[in-house]
Amino acid sequence: MTKLFFATAWSHQGPQGPHFFETVMNLRALLMSALATALTAQVKVPVPDPKPILGVDPAYMDRSASPCADFYAFANGSYDKVAIPAAYAAYGVNQEIDDRNWTILKEILETSARQASDSKAVRGSVAQRIGDFYASGMDVEAIEKAGVLPLSEAFDRVNRMTDPSALAPTLAWMHRHGLGGGFSFFVAPDDKDSASEIARLYQGGLGLPEREYYFRLDDDSKKLREKYVAHVAKILELAGDRPAAAKRAAEHILALETSLAEASKRLVDLRDPVANYHKLKRAEISDLAKGFDWPTYFDRLGFPSSQQDLLVGQPEFLKAFAKLTQAVPLPDWQAYLRWNVLNGTASELGKSFEEEDFAFFGTTLSGRKEMLPRWKRILQTTDRAIGEDLGQLYVKQAFSPTAKARALEMVKFHKEAMRLSLRNSVWMSEATKMAAYKKLDTMNSKVGFPDRWRDYSKLDIRRQPYVMNVMAARAFEFQRRMAKLGKPVDRAEWGMTPQTNNAYYNPSLNEMCFPAGILQPPFFDEKADDAVNYGALASTIGHELTHGFDDQGRQYDEKGNLKDWWGPGDVKAFKERADLVVKQYDGFEPLPGLHVNGAQSLGENIADVGGLKIAYMAYKLASKDKTLKTVDGLTPDQRFFVAFAQGWRTNVRPESLRLQVTSDVHCPIRFRVIGPVTDLPQFYEAFGCKDEGKRPVAAAKSVW
């Protein structure tokens, strides 16, 4: 299972997890949710006194830098001197917000763990589940004592394989338990029928971040692959393999993954939703990808026989995978599957596994010097496993009704601004504008937390080895999603937990989501003035709204269906402007010789540039009848732009920069400030910049 992941929605910060945004909520679930909410009332914890984080902090600025030459340096130059803590690959405003959120969550978890231990939490209640889950992760002695014994069933299934036909039931078991290998199977709304859930087969099975890591020929990339082989061998050795056998197995695993990578699409090619949409009958899969026992895989997976349709993302990949099941020796497949079991659980096992896992994925790939404190690591896993349980307790302390009302008002003004931008677009036909208005009007906005909480009542969490609770949660989530098949899409479900410091736009549901975890200072402060709030949230509300009309989002209609609703001339004009954005960002060079891939990051760059423009327009609409002050020598407009830039202030290790440029659709932080401001005439006016002739080529024709 890769330690980085592909997400179906587009987010403010970057990928946080494979959220597919679906749930089933029947009457029983509603009743259970109400009961669980009632049971949480017993958990009362003190609210920490948070350290204020200002939307505009003059201490972070470097006023000796020219805002017109390098606005990031002007707004954040003094912050550049702040050292990155050893446990982080990058450190900045997001990590500060996380730390404050986590302080609240830590109190909730520790209080719940004490109550669960003292039998004061009712069995099956929110407090019991999160308390026992957290306590099992903090029980280092029990984790060490259990070793890899909790994984015995997985290993036994792999070891009992006697011929290639056994791959199908073994992979099905692994996928049902949230373990990677071979390819990906998941359930999500149908891109061309957004009211229906459908099963999907997608490329996968790689241990390195993405396909290009297997083929680059520079010395650093070759050394990285050598370190990867050594890492795989060490993990296998910790699980009981002899050193020489582990090394041979690791080399064969790299060879097998390289074959899978060769058949995989590049990251930039995965961004085309039409090219990655192929609806087939389940019976056709066996003809498409001969050599793998698909009927047995589907049967053991629990894929209902009533479901005849599947979406195949990359048919050529499935063909190659099926051939490899016959061509690659069975012992190599067994080693590969054992590696996937261990790779997917190493951070939940004993100290030696966790440290080796961190040494490669944390240090080698990201440059981190040490692990986060254990409580933070377990907190993050709890959030991924039963996050809405945790969220019910978090929002009571961290998000007021007043904050939600003001955030919703800001969303309203952003939508008004987007309508004006669409109306003023000289390159769009009237027919396409009308369709765009309709999409904008039907776009749903989720703010703060869900109206209905997810029902985890059938998930059995107890004081048992930590990895068993993690595996139980993964299996529960797989079954929860599988149960959606044949039922209408639940548009009320959230794809992020309320405590998440991030946001997303989901094209299949035509919705934006802004969790309470990101609606915190400095991104949002219910007491701050409009210049600061709209500037700081430009990279959130404006960004996600613009995703609905970026190079991918524009291909989905108002119902979330993948459908061509643009006139031919509009498409041509859009692509001409998008190409200018690609050219602009191709010119950015985060490290010597390492350039941003403008095509790979196009959607995020359009959302960054358009988001700032829309946020500025929204700020003007919201403040037109108000008197805003000059503060610390900065006019209201200047404070808007400084708040925007300081909302990105982050120091990043070179290893993490390289990883992001090569494996992420978001460009590095500094250019998420520089790119948008240099494309906006109002920025030049605010700071009196006279060097218009030096503006990048994209500024001549911004998309939105």
Image (cartoon, helix red, strand yellow):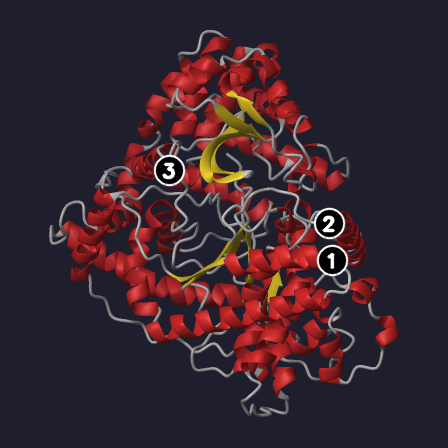
Horizontal arrangement in the rendering, residue 40 relative to residue 330 (left or right): left
> Gap between marks 2 and 1, in whole Å?
7 Å
Q: Is residue 343 visible?
A: no
Other residues around mark 3 within 10 Å, as few (<14) / some (14–19) / many (≥20): many
Where disc 1 sits, the SS reads loop
Q: Is residue 515 visible?
A: yes
Circles 1 and 3, Cβ within 8 Å, touching? The answer is: no
| Residue ID for mark 3 | 349
Furthest residue in direction right, as rendered: 693
* Residue at point 47%, 76% (across, down): 53
Residue 429 is marked as 1
The amino acid on which the numbered mark 1 sits, given as a three-letter code, is Ser
* Residue at point 52%, 45% (across, down): 508
Where disc 2 sits, the SS reads loop
Horizontal arrangement in the rendering, residue 146 relative to residue 671 (left or right): left
Front residue of 490/482: it is 490
Other residues around mark 2 within 10 Å, as few (<14) / some (14–19) / many (≥20): some
Q: Quadrant of residue 436?
A: bottom right
Residue 288 is situated, as x and y percent measured from the top left of the image, at: 60, 16
Circles 2 and 1, Cβ within 8 Å, touching? The answer is: yes
The amino acid on which the numbered mark 2 sits, given as a three-letter code, is Gly
> Gap between marks 1 and 3, in whole Å?
58 Å
The amino acid on which the numbered mark 3 sits, given as a three-letter code, is Leu
Residue 567 is marked as 2
